[in-house]
Amino acid sequence: KPVIELAGVTKTYPGGVTALRSVDLVVDDGELLAIVGPSGSGKSTMLNLIGTLDRPSRGTVRIDGHDVASLSDRELSALRARRIGFVFQQFHLAPGRDALGNVADGLLYYGVPKKERERRAEAALVRVGLGNRLAHRPHQLSGGERQRVAIARAVAGDPALLLADEPTGNLDSASGAGVMELLRELNEAGTTILVITHDREIANGLPRQVPMRDGQVI
Ligand code: ADP
Ligand code: ADP
């Protein structure tokens, strides 16, 4: 069943720039794919629409079976918090919280008690190979480890979809390769993952590539 369905999606920003033009895309449950294209091709706009952070000007966006046009802003926030995991180039970890705290805080939306959040956070950190780093703060971790914490936080709630925006953009090539390997492992265990990248090599290492140029899938 599809996790992402875009049909005839156009996005025009106030001011008149059309960042996406009639884009169609279907991503099935269990896929691992890359949206790949140069700067300005519309990748971030696509990420914002798929991540339900923005709405299309025309066309339909369905995420995890929900037509985003039929949901209020409040319902969209709930869908985003519970069903979509985000990973960014800049990690976005809280500097004052250790790895366990960073991951556990990602579960606040689920309404589970603290002990249960910490239990799930520890399990997620073990999954990404950081079972021995629970009490480390971000500044005590390498770049590759910080991104693994961010990935643990993104998958701890068992999302329908993991969106990774240039996940290796801030890493040396060895750490980047490790992060891509981790994403492949998580995908094999069942998580649907979409990677946004300008890096052809990263994209070519994944089972499916969606090339973009000038706001269109080519
Ligand atoms: P990419 O992520 O591939 O670099 P973007 O989606 O950021 O592409 O940009 C696609 C086009 O939309 C570019 O021409 C960009 O300048 C424009 N754009 C992106 N965001 C905005 C915005 N908030 N307002 C106006 N124009 C925007
Ligand atoms: P990676 O495999 O992510 O590239 P590194 O080789 O950069 O890892 O780091 C090796 C080890 O050094 C890591 O386990 C990390 O915990 C530790 N480390 C890295 N940077 C720091 C730091 N600034 N302070 C304390 N420990 C660090």
Image (cartoon, rainbow, N blue to C red):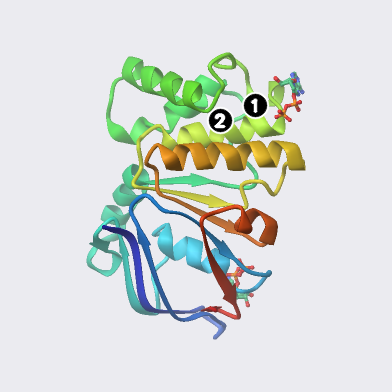
The residue singled out by tag 1 in the image is 138
Q: Percent from the top left, x then y, of residue 180?
A: 60, 43
Please rate how many residues cluster around mark 1, counting C-alpha atoms within 10 Å: few if below 14, some from 14 to 19, many from 20.
many
User: Looking at numbered disc 2 in the image, what kind of residue is underneath it?
Assistant: Val
- Foreground: 27 or 64? 27
Q: In this view, does 198 lie to the left or right of 126?
A: right
User: Looking at numbered disc 1 in the image, what kind of residue is underneath it?
Assistant: Pro
Please name which of the two marks, 1 or 2, marks the residue nearer to the observer: 2
The residue singled out by tag 2 in the image is 149
Q: In which quarter of the image is the N terminus?
A: bottom left
- Foreground: 68 or 203? 203
Q: Quick check: marks 1 and 2 in contact, CB under 8 Å?
A: yes
- Foreground: 172 or 140? 172
Query: Is residue 40 placed above or below 68 in the rendered structure?
Result: below
Residue at image location 28% in from the left, 25% down from the top: 112
Q: Percent from the top left, x then y, of residue 14?
A: 51, 80
Residue at image location 64% in from the left, 47% down from the top: 89
Residue at image location 47% in from the left, 62% down from the top: 48
Q: Percent from the top left, x then y, of residue 103?
A: 47, 28
Query: Is residue 132 placed above or below 12 in the rendered structure?
Result: above
Distance between the alpha carbons at the discs numbered 1 and 2? 9 Å
> For numbered disc 1, what is the local secondary structure?
helix
Query: For disc 2, does the CB lie below 8 Å from ligand 2?
Result: no
Q: Percent from the top left, x then y, of residue 123?
A: 42, 21
Q: How many labels does the image show?
A: 2
Query: Is residue 183 placed above or below 32 in the rendered structure?
Result: above
Q: Earlier in the sequence, mark 1 or mark 2?
A: 1
